[in-house]
Amino acid sequence: MHPNKNKNLDKTLLSIILILMVFGLMMIASAGIIYSETRFGDNYYFFKHQFFFGFIPGLAVLYFFQKIDYHYWRKIAVPLFLISLIFLILVFIPGVGTKVYGASRWIQLGHLSFQPSEMAKIATILYLAAWFESKGKRRIGDFFEGVAPFLGILGILGFLILKQPDTGTLGLIILVSGIIYFVSGAKISHTLALVFTALVGLWMLIKLAPYRMNRFLVFLNPELDPRGIGYQINQALLAVGSGGIFGIGLGHSRQKFNYLPEPVGDSIFAIIGEELGIIGAGTVVLLFVILAFRGFRIARNSPDDFGKLVAVGITSWIVFQAFINIAAITSIIPLTGIPLPFISYGGTSLVFLLAGSGILLNISKQTKLCA
């Protein structure tokens, strides 16, 4: 039996999600105006595309998912995970998958494109939560019943995502999966061993791919080749730095005039810093901090282990993706290409983020945390 459901969901969390969504639309309209004109001959192409293929369907997904009892996802976690693996394979099939900038990350469905790695994030969270709950803490702590199968799951995902290639997304999935594994009752020694293995693997991936090594070298020395491999981070830092405390004004960015690459994508935080200054950028950071606080409180107050693990996974996904993006654009870590949740351009990303948010809000209905 499940505990009685509260009729009220976490309104604070819902408000933050909606604020970030609307703010994202506003910033896409501002940051993408020149980029849209250059690529498509329409100043508001990115805004309109995000509104009709991300914002509107995303709101519908958020509404319906927050109404579905989260225990339902435990029943379909395995087939959902398998479907996500099939989609990850389909990106390599000619005529189905499409290449953009040399990366095979999209499936083309008529005029619509779909990024399976976004589905893989939420499918992996649901699958691991269901799997770890079924194992129990004793079996999770066993190497052959806990650690080895867990590594096997990540190995399959890792192979498919690295083939695209998308190291940033893989790193995020491994990080979130590791957090779920730890919270489910893993031994400290096993967790530390996995962290060490992940760091060694990351270093090997950096060494094996020249573009990853270039990003790492630019991180160590941002002045290195400012017109070549260091161009994006230097333009991003210039944008953030020129914003000062209050910014130069919404819509007045200079870096969006085809200086900063991907101003509506993973670089959008730089435009926020330039136009709205430390005040605007700091407010965005604060919203994600509050979101983290609410999400982890929902996890702590969840009525069962499945709800707790799902809430931890979804909250970690959103928050760590946000802070990885922000840290990369401000040169705290190397550039990753990971978008800023709810704000960066990308319909697939927004819809699946809102699907996860809907599940998290449903969990909040079944806890004593409603404010």
Image (cartoon, rainbow, N blue to C red):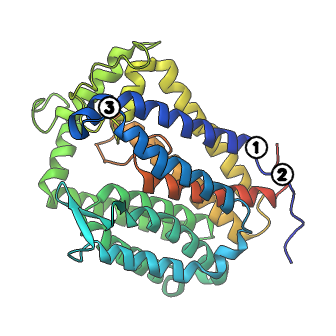
Identify the residue position indicated by label 3 in the image.
43
**Left or right: 143 as drawn, with respect to 262:** right
Q: Total number of numbered labels?
A: 3
Which residue is rendered at x = 56% and y = 26% of the image?
Answer: 283
> Mark 1 falls on what kind of element?
helix
Which residue is rendered at x = 76% and y = 43% of the image?
Answer: 11
Mark on residue 131?
none
The quadrant the C terminus occupies is: top right
Q: Measuring from the top left, give residue 59's x and y in whole percent.
A: 60, 51
Q: Amino acid at mark 2?
A: Asn
* Mark 1 burial class by Cα count in 10 Å: few <14, some 14-19, many 20+: few
Q: CA distance from mark 2 to mark 3?
A: 41 Å
Which residue is rendered at x = 63% and y = 65% of the image?
Answer: 310
Q: Measuring from the top left, give residue 102's x and y in whole percent.
A: 16, 59
Q: CA distance from mark 2 to mark 1?
A: 8 Å
The quadrant the N terminus occupies is: bottom right
Q: Amino acid at mark 1?
A: Lys
Sequence-wise, the earlier of marks 2 and 3 is 2
Up-down: is 253 above or below 194? above
Task: Indicate the quadrant where residue 215 lies.
Answer: top left
State the residue in front, 212 or 355: 355
State the residue in front, 61 or 291: 61
Q: Amino acid at mark 3?
A: Asn
Say whether residue 141 is visible: no
Q: Measuring from the top left, give residue 181's x and y in whole percent.
A: 55, 68
State the residue in front, 250 or 299: 250
Identify the residue position indicated by label 1 in the image.
11
**Contact, mark 2 vs mark 1 (Cβ under 8 Å):** yes
Identify the residue position indicated by label 2 in the image.
8
Q: Measuring from the top left, give residue 219's x and y in whole percent.
A: 24, 38
> Mark 3 falls on what kind of element?
loop
**Left or right: 141 as drawn, with respect to 225:** right
